[in-house]
Amino acid sequence: MTQMKGRTGLAGVAMAAVLVLAFQAMGSRGAAPPPVTAATVDLERVFVALTELAAEQTHLQELGANMDTENDAKQAELKRMDEELAILEVGTARYDELERQYIQKSIEYQAWIEFMRRQIDREKALVLEKVYNSVKQAVRDMAAQHGYDIVYLNDSLKPLQRGSEASIQQQISARRMLYTNPALDITEDLIQRMNNAYAAGG
């Protein structure tokens, strides 16, 4: 009888151990994931306030000014040729030669205009890409430093632009954020960090 009770006791202990292990396994499988630390950034405000972007835009303005100067010179040359053609007798050797030069210069001028337009567009695109990549790197550094798991682009701040029903629907569909707690916003910290880094040479 005593032996039976001993066996029953051991069996109970073994069963209890099995149950504990089972509950532990269930708990590990069903455990909630760790909380996520998030932050938000107003990208439009960042772009407006960045020293780096302002410097790049100054460079673009210089390119535009140089283009305007060259454009004025080319237009002045075409105007001079046109005025000379107006006083020359049609059919003379000088008229025919100048007309040929004028047509050639006009074709070259139109090609130059198109080339410069494409170059300016390309430069603008490169500037935006460069600054956007700088923002992403700065955000990545801040996330590593402060433990942010996710940094959202806060598009809930900008009001909808009035327009047609289709336009409003398109704007709403493009939005990803309805509301964020202002306490999560790191925009000013990001701007200060990037401007300080730019002032220090990178």
Image (cartoon, rainbow, N blue to C red):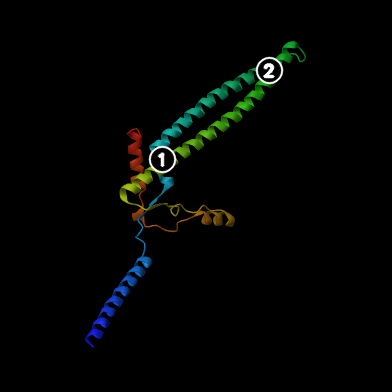
Density class for disc 1 (Cα within 10 Å; few <14, some 14-19, many ≥20) is some
Task: Name the foreground residue: 168 vs 176.
Answer: 176
Residue 24 place in picture, x, y as percent: 32, 69
Give the mark nearer the N terminus: 1 vs 2.
Answer: 2
Q: In which quarter of the image is residue 195?
A: top left
Q: What element carries label 2?
A: helix
Label for residue 134?
1
Figure check: 126 above or below 156? above
Q: Which residue lies furthest to the left in this view?
A: 2
Residue 154 location in percent, x, y? 42, 52
Residue drawn at (47%, 56%) of the image: 176
- Residue sitting at x 68%, y 17%: 101
The secondary element bearing badge 1 is classed as helix
Q: How far apart are the two marked residues, 1 and 2, measured between alpha carbons?
A: 48 Å
What amino acid is found at the position of numbered circle 2 in the picture?
Answer: Gln
Tell me, for residue 101, which label it has, or none.
2
Q: Residues within 10 Å of mark 2 (few under 14, many from 20)?
A: some
Up the image or down, 75 lies above or below 200; here it is above
Q: In which quarter of the image is residue 8?
A: bottom left
- Residue 116 is marked as none
Q: Quadrant of the C terminus?
A: top left
Residue 92 is situated, as x and y percent measured from the top left of the image, at 76, 12
Outermost residue to the bottom: 1
Please report the residue visible at 61 percent of the width from the left and 19 percent of the height from the top: 77
Query: Quarter holding the N terminus?
Result: bottom left
**Image location (x, y in percent) of residue 30:** 38, 67
Q: Write the residue at 48% across / 31% down.
A: 60
**Type of residue at label 1?**
Ser
